[in-house]
Image (cartoon, rainbow, N blue to C red):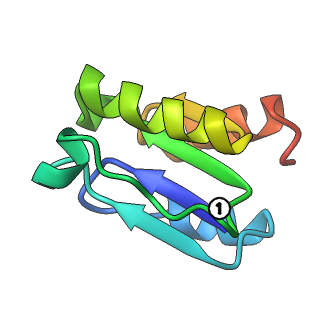
Amino acid sequence: MAILIGADRLGNIEKLLKARGFSKLKHISGRHSKAQGGMVVGMSNATLMILFTDFVGHNVMHNFRKQAKAQKIPFIACRRSVSDVARSLEKFGFA
């Protein structure tokens, strides 16, 4: 399962992730007030967390990066574009 934070729509990113073997996706909009205030995400089945930097603030990024690190889940921060996500996935070995 991949956890995606930020952006209102995923567009073709959803297709890319499913093609890379992520059958389950959990999407959290960065606009949600709880996300900005320290929202805790259940990550028991997660194998990756992706945060779209062009749609969230520093507090949101800090909160989710801290959670991913505590759970030992790879954390990718990138722009919301298919090419940027694909490049980041390859960099982390999710080719």
| Residue 36 location (% of width, % of height) | 19, 40
User: Eyeballing the image, is 77 above or below 83?
Assistant: above
Question: Residue 38 falls in which quadrant of the image?
Answer: top left
Q: Amino acid at mark 1?
A: Leu
In the image, what residue occupies the spot 51% across and 64% down?
Answer: 42
Residue drawn at (80%, 29%), measured in percent from left and top? 91
| Camera sees residue 17 | yes
Q: Most extreme residue toward the bottom, as rendered?
A: 23
Which residue is disc 1 drawn over? 16
Q: Is residue 77 left or right of residue 73?
A: left
Q: Is residue 31 left or right of residue 30?
A: left
Residue 14 spot, x, y in % from top left? 54, 67
Q: In the rendered picture of this protein, how many numbered marks are placed on residues?
A: 1
Place residue 9 in its image quadrant: bottom left
State left or right for residue 95 relative to residue 13.
Answer: right
Foreground of the two, 85 or 22:
22
Q: Which image quarter holds the N terminus?
A: bottom right
Q: Is residue 29 left or right of residue 79?
A: left
Residue 26, image x, y percentages:
48, 69
Q: Position of residue 71 (x, y in %)?
A: 67, 45
Dot 1: few (<14), some (14–19), or many (≥20) neighbours within 10 Å? some
